[in-house]
Image: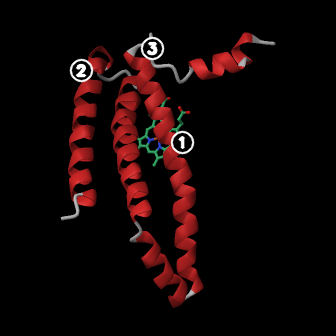
Amino acid sequence: MNPSRSPRHFWLWFDPRSKHLGALGFIMNRVAGIGLTFYLFLHLLALGQLALGPKAYDHFIALVHHPLFLAGEYLVVIGGMLHGLNGLRVAFTSLGKGAAYQKPLFYGLMSLALGVILYFGIRMLGGG
Ligand code: HEM
């Protein structure tokens, strides 16, 4: 079997040990990007309920108040912040802008993401 197709090789992809910052950033971006894509389909499915009339709409509103939905929305905030801000860094450095500062840029943008994630966490899940 081609070693790059072996199950062991597949699980190594998820092993954070001995990975450089760039590789960790890439993995984070990919996981968040795939998660956001999954959410996009879920979102369209949920919004499709609105076309089914007032009863379906009321049911939809009750559904989005469920704590599970809220937790899912918070995951979207986390994924959106990590992917969006890191994506901007990848886009700029790919265009040759700021490549020399990509590490401090990564730390700075991820600190900003963390701040926003914490803020939304308190506002959305804090019960206030
Ligand atoms: C501010 C908004 C966004 C920015 C700046 C952004 C930027 C990027 C960049 C630069 C890449 C390429 C990463 C690489 O080559 O290493 C990428 C990949 C990707 N993005 Fe986004 N993105 C944004 C929003 C979204 C949204 C809303 C979704 C989903 C609905 C999404 C889904 C994906 C997926 C699935 C990939 C491929 C990941 C991979 O194969 O590694 N992105 N994005």
Where residue 124 sits, quadrant-wise, is: bottom left
Q: Is mark 1 within 8 Å of ligand 1?
A: yes
* Closer mark to the observer between disc 2 and disc 3: 3
Query: Is the C-beta of the residue carrying label 3 under 8 Å from the nearest atom of ligand 1?
Result: no
- Of the residues tagged 3 and 1, which is closer to the observer? 3
On the image, the x and y values in percent for residue 100 come to 29, 14
Q: Which residue is mark 1?
A: 34
Report the residue marked by disc 2.
Answer: 104
Identify the residue position indicated by label 3 in the image: 17
Residue neighbourhood size for the residue with mark 3, other residues' Cα within 10 Å, grouped as few (<14), some (14–19), many (≥20)? few
**What's under tag 1, amino acid-wise?**
Ile
Spatial CA span between label 2 and label 3: 21 Å
Disc 3 residue type?
Arg
Marks 3/1: CA–CA distance: 22 Å
How many neighbours does mark 2 have within 10 angstroms: few (below 14), some (14-19), or many (20 or more)?
few
Return the x and y of residue 4 as percentages of the image width and height: 70, 14
Question: Which residue, as the protein is rendered here, is positioned at the far bottom?
Answer: 54
Q: Secondary structure at mark 1?
A: helix
> Residue placed farthest to the left in the image?
128
Report whether 96 appears left or right of 32: left
Residue at x-position 44% and y-position 31%: 28
Q: Residue at x 40, y 39 (%)?
A: 83
Residue type of the residue flagged with mark 2: Pro
> Label 2, label 1: how many angstroms apart (C-alpha)?
26 Å
Q: Earlier in the sequence, mark 3 or mark 1?
A: 3
Which quadrant, please, contains the N terminus? top right
Percent position (x, y) of residue 102?
31, 20
**Disc 2 on helix, strand or loop?**
helix
Mark nearer the viewer, 2 or 1: 1
**Closest to the observer, 89 or 121:** 121
Which residue is located at x 37 percent, y 24 percent? 93
Q: Looking at the rendering, which quadrant does residue 61 occupy?
A: bottom left
